[in-house]
Image (cartoon, grey):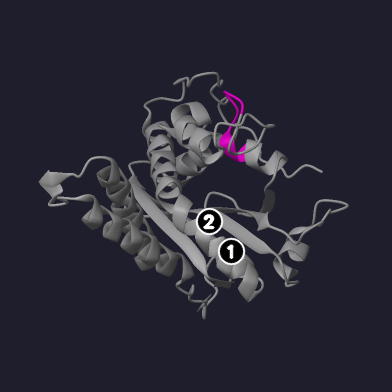
Amino acid sequence: MIAVSLVYLDLIALFLGIVSLIKPLVFLRIRNRRQATLIVALGLLLAVVGWALPAKEVHIAVLRTQLDQFAPVYQFNEVHSIQVAASREQVYQAIKNVTVDEIHLFRTLTWIRRCGREGGESILNPPEHIPILEVATRTGFLLLAEDHNREIVVGAAVATPPGFQPKRRPTPEEFKAVRQPGFALATMNFLVEDAGPGVSTVTTETRVYATDPSTRRRFAVYWRVIYPGSALIRRMWLQALKRRAEAPGPGTRFPGRESPRPGSDGPEIQAKN
């Protein structure tokens, strides 16, 4: 977080300095172009420092969750949680069934992330009315583990060696065993825990493990730029599943989705070859 904050503060300073080269922002005490040039230079220098700060490697000592099993070592992570007035079963189904249409700002932020490119179906460009985790696991993500009504874990290679062309989708055990240079593996979970009668806590965490120092340095630049948008998406995602889980009555309908029949657990998420 220190590196992310440093990068963004310096990018703001850089922007203000460039604007002041055109017209000095006197209200910010930037009175002439010489001061603006110094601010631009300082912003560039400190942004480079922020990008270059080493990412600390974290080792999980006690393996408590499925996420710990698949990502016991990582250099980058983000964690968000929310309390939901619903049972673990209701919350878990909400996690599996929530769609992109229910997540505020999702399409706007992922459009920015894609730089406006359309591309094929993916978690950054999902179709309407389909659970977002279903889209993820049928495109770039692999379903790694599912502990019913408690935790679901997915993973993807977010960086690969030049020219790497997988012949098939790896198994969860093969994903966990990747240690060859050039890879950055992202593992994400949703964990549901009891927080009192009729109340649950949902935690979602993303961990990224880069397999060598060069990949770690390259990924650090990317991570420190996209982190604020990624964090906002995850918070909006949690808000969406909270609304769905707390919606009254089994007959409640959501845009484009049929309510599960009584006794049904709803659609299952499967990794497809």
Q: Residues within 10 Å of mark 2 (few under 14, many from 20)?
A: few
User: Is the N terminus in the top left, top right, bottom left or bottom right quadrant?
Assistant: bottom left
Which one is in front, 220 or 151?
220
Residue 218: numbered disc: 1
Who's the residue at 51% across and 31% down the image? 100
User: Is the C terminus in the top left, top right, bottom left or bottom right quadrant?
Assistant: top right
- In percent of width and height, residue 34 lies at 24, 56
> From which residue to which does the magenta span run?
127-134
Who's the residue at 67% across and 32% down the image? 119
Query: Is residue 34 visible in this depiction of the protein?
Result: yes
Q: Quadrant of residue 138?
A: top right
Amino acid identity at mark 2:
Tyr
Q: Is residue 207 above or below residue 101?
A: below
Q: Quadrant of residue 118?
A: top right
Amino acid identity at mark 1:
Arg
Residue that protrudes farthest toward the right in the picture: 167
In-image side of 18 versus 192 (left or right)? left
Please tell me whether residue 43 belongs to the stretch shown in magenta.
no
Whole-Å distance between the Cαs marked 2 and 1? 7 Å
Residue that protrudes farthest toward the bottom in the picture: 61
Please tell me whether residue 133 belongs to the stretch shown in magenta.
yes
- In percent of width and height, residue 101 lies at 49, 26
Which one is in front, 252 or 162?
162
Q: Main SS of the magenta segment?
A: loop
Who's the residue at 32% across and 63% down the image? 42
Query: Is residue 59 visible in this depiction of the protein?
Result: no
Secondary structure category for the residue under label 2:
helix
Secondary structure category for the residue under label 1:
helix
Residue 37: numbered disc: none
Who's the residue at 22% across and 57% down the image? 35
Confirm or deny contact between disc 2 and disc 1 (CB under 8 A): yes
Q: Which residue is mark 2?
A: 222
